[in-house]
Image (cartoon, rainbow, N blue to C red):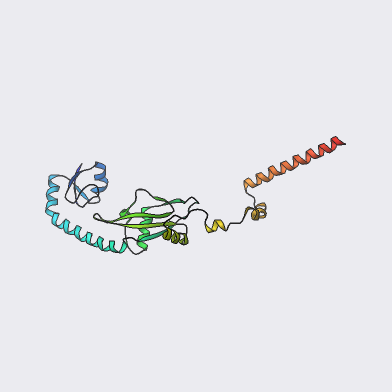
Amino acid sequence: MEVILLERIEKLGQMGDVVTVKPGFARNYLIPQRKALRATKENLSVFESQRAQLEADNLARRQEAESVAGKVEGLSVVIIRQAGDSGQLYGSVSSRDIAEAVTEAGATIQRGQVVLDRPLKTLGVHPVRVRLHPEVSIGISCNIARSEAEAEMQASTGQAVTGATDEDEAAPEPEALTEDLLENPTGEEVQELIEGGESETTESTSDEEEKKGEA
């Protein structure tokens, strides 16, 4: 399907270009979002009559975006998430999460302006691109950590903090848990106790039989 672009679309073209796109992309995104019109003679005439106003509006939006870009460029936002020792998150960080973090930092953006190929699923400092305007993009950092302390460490070293957390290191040794486990055993521990009891019983029975044989 041929459409007339009403603004610059990355990898497609500039405002006023007539380009060919897949019908679904045009119907579900470009046309409903008012980023393009069907390339008919009638629409071409409408576009040309409104071109000056569209270009003026686009220029105003671009200048506003450039003003915001000066404040946000290089921003680093911290997002706290739970993760395993390998650094794999229990879940993921999406464009919505990043947009909310940037907004909390003082610059309002929408999730659609955060450019992510896929959700982030590991600890560390991740570079993220934010498209403030079709012609204005900036780079920010998303620092995903299990705590504020880890985030500070990652920011200073540039490396993801993996391995045991402070909570893991503070966990008591298995021996220290023995008494509590006996009071509140789990299913596996109950089975171990049963098997242990059976073993002791078997050994006791064997001892008695040996004594009888000697007698």
Res. 139 image quadrant: bottom left
Q: Is residue 181 left or right of residue 158?
A: right
* Residue at image location 78% in from the left, 39% down from the top: 205
Looking at the image, which is closer to me, 35 or 128? 128
Of 58 and 28, nearer the camera is: 58
| In the foreground, 62 or 76 | 76
**Residue 28, image x and y in percent?**
27, 46
Location of residue 214 in the rendering, given as x and y in whole percent from the top left corner? 86, 36
- Tell me the quarter of the image containing the N terminus: top left
Image location (x, y in percent) of residue 74:
33, 60
Extreme right residue here? 215
Indicate the position of residue 16 as horizontal and vertical percent values: 16, 50
Quarter of the image for residue 40 reads top left
In the image, taking residue 196 as reference, residue 127 lies left or right, namely left
| Callout count | 0
Left-right relation of 169 to 3: right
For this orientation, the residue located farthest to the front is: 157
**Residue at position x 37%, y 59% from top?**
100
Q: Quadrant of the C terminus?
A: top right
Residue 94 in the image: above or below residue 20: below
